Image (cartoon, helix red, strand yellow):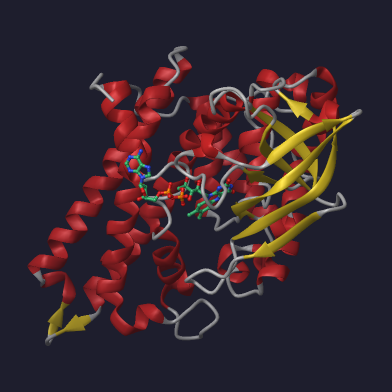
Amino acid sequence: MDLNLTPAEEAFRQEIRSWFARNLPHEWKMAEIRKLSEDAAAAALRKWQLRLGEAGWLGLSWPKEYGGRGGTLMEQAIYLTEGHYADAPLPLDWVGLRLLGPTLMDVGTPELRARYLNRIVSGQMVWCQGFSEPNAGSDLAALQTRAVLDGDHYVVNGHKIWSTTAQYADWCMLLARTNPDVPKHKGITMFAVDMKSQGVTVRPIKQIGATSEFSEIFFDNVRIPRNNIIGGLDNGWGVAMRALTYERGLYTMINQAKYRTSWEEMVAYARQARRNGRPMIEDPRVRELLAQSYADIELMRLTNLRSLTRYQRGIPPAEESSLMKLHWSLAEQRLYDLGMTLGGPKALAMATSPRALYDGSWNTYYFQSRSVTIYGGTQDIQRNLIAERIYGLPR
Ligand SMILES: Cc1cc2nc3c(=O)[nH]c(=O)nc-3n(C[C@H](O)[C@H](O)[C@H](O)COP(=O)(O)OP(=O)(O)OC[C@H]3O[C@@H](n4cnc5c(N)ncnc54)[C@H](O)[C@@H]3O)c2cc1C
């Protein structure tokens, strides 16, 4: 494992740091975005995404032939970390950039690649992921949304749920059943669906943190051209699993920097805030929880570096992604539970309140942390994967 940046990586870090300093206006920093209504925040993020696209940062680790910069994963990690320290928001289009784009590079037809990749990498599109259904989450292969061939089109009927940013998405990567007469993993196909198609209805779901990060999507006789199939007819299961591996790997890199910042804020807060007449930092229980979170974050940083080093040596870290997902999701919950314990009633003030602690970030992240052990595969599913694939235990 190599713990140090090379001189070239250090120079890259300086370059990206000064780019953020010059190009990220105050009103687009996360602290300000959190104060906006959801619609206003989405509009600002779209503009920010375009700026990142024009500068070439969205495609930092994409190959040059697809409009990327052909950078290394280490550069990608540096970019994400510096973005966090600059308080830069992530682009609105998480799905296109992180899931669909790499998947299309692997399995898309030349026509689909030409149609979408350039627009995704320049920040012109927002995609959503239409996988889960009310009765198909962990058991995704049980999905019931049907796509039936009619001439040159498939006609789609069904109901998707928990689809992040669907209310702002231009396109959806959809999983639908194209063959009901074969074992359930084998009759699924992935499609690219224009969200403006007739028969698509999006209904946002209100969450515990008062936002609507995700939506239900209803498909009522929606016609999809048959050349919008991604990765081949009835191949959707394998294509979707590939996309989910990309998803799990990248969260890890971004989150570690976020946790580090919150942890440092919590230490500073515990030093100056008093409970029962003495600084909270002197409470042995608080010290123990801070130490536990510090160890969690360090473990994550070092495992990230190990994965990156392995990756650069040509060893894909696939089997580690479940281990990391499980670790960081539990670490995140421990950390923001601690934030709530330290802040008490003050930590409940939301970002829009002038009394919010640390621009409302602990509060926002606490509510978000409830969902981390669910999305991208629940903690139980990750445990199953670790048991079976890493330890070779029976199903
Ligand atoms: C913030 C957020 C964003 C999301 N974004 C998207 C999105 O953009 N697109 C999309 O398609 N989906 C999205 N999802 C949905 C997500 O993929 C599902 O919630 C997840 O797969 C779990 O499915 P479920 O909610 O139906 O729960 P279920 O699968 O019904 O699980 C219920 C409980 O049973 C447990 N369980 C289920 N099966 C097993 C098993 N075999 N072994 C042990 N325990 C098991 C689970 O761990 C869980 O505790 C999102 C979810 C969240 C929370």
Residue 5 location, quadrant: top left
Please tell me whether residue 20 is drawn above or below residue 280 in the rendered image.
above
Residue 337, how many percent across, how many down? Answer: 29, 65
Residue occupying the far right of the picture: 151
Could you tell me if residue 289 is visible in this image?
yes
Please tell me whether residue 204 is drawn above or below residue 93 in the rendered image.
below
Residue occupying the far left of the picture: 284
Residue lying at 26% horizontally and 28% vertically, measured from the top left: 387
Q: Is residue 132 left or right of residue 166?
A: left
Residue lying at 55% horizontally and 68% vertically, measured from the top left: 31
Quadrant for the C terminus, please. top left
Quadrant for the N terminus, please. top left
Could you tell me if residue 122 is visible in this image?
no
Please tell me whether residue 27 is drawn above or below residue 370 in the rendered image.
below
Residue 345, how many percent across, how many down? Answer: 32, 84
Residue lying at 16% horizontally and 67% vertically, measured from the top left: 286
Q: How many marks?
A: 0
Residue 328, how many percent across, how many down? Answer: 34, 45
Residue lying at 29% horizontally and 22% vertically, measured from the top left: 390
Q: Is residue 153 left or right of residue 284?
A: right
Residue 274, how many percent across, how many down? Answer: 19, 82
Residue 69 location, quadrant: top right
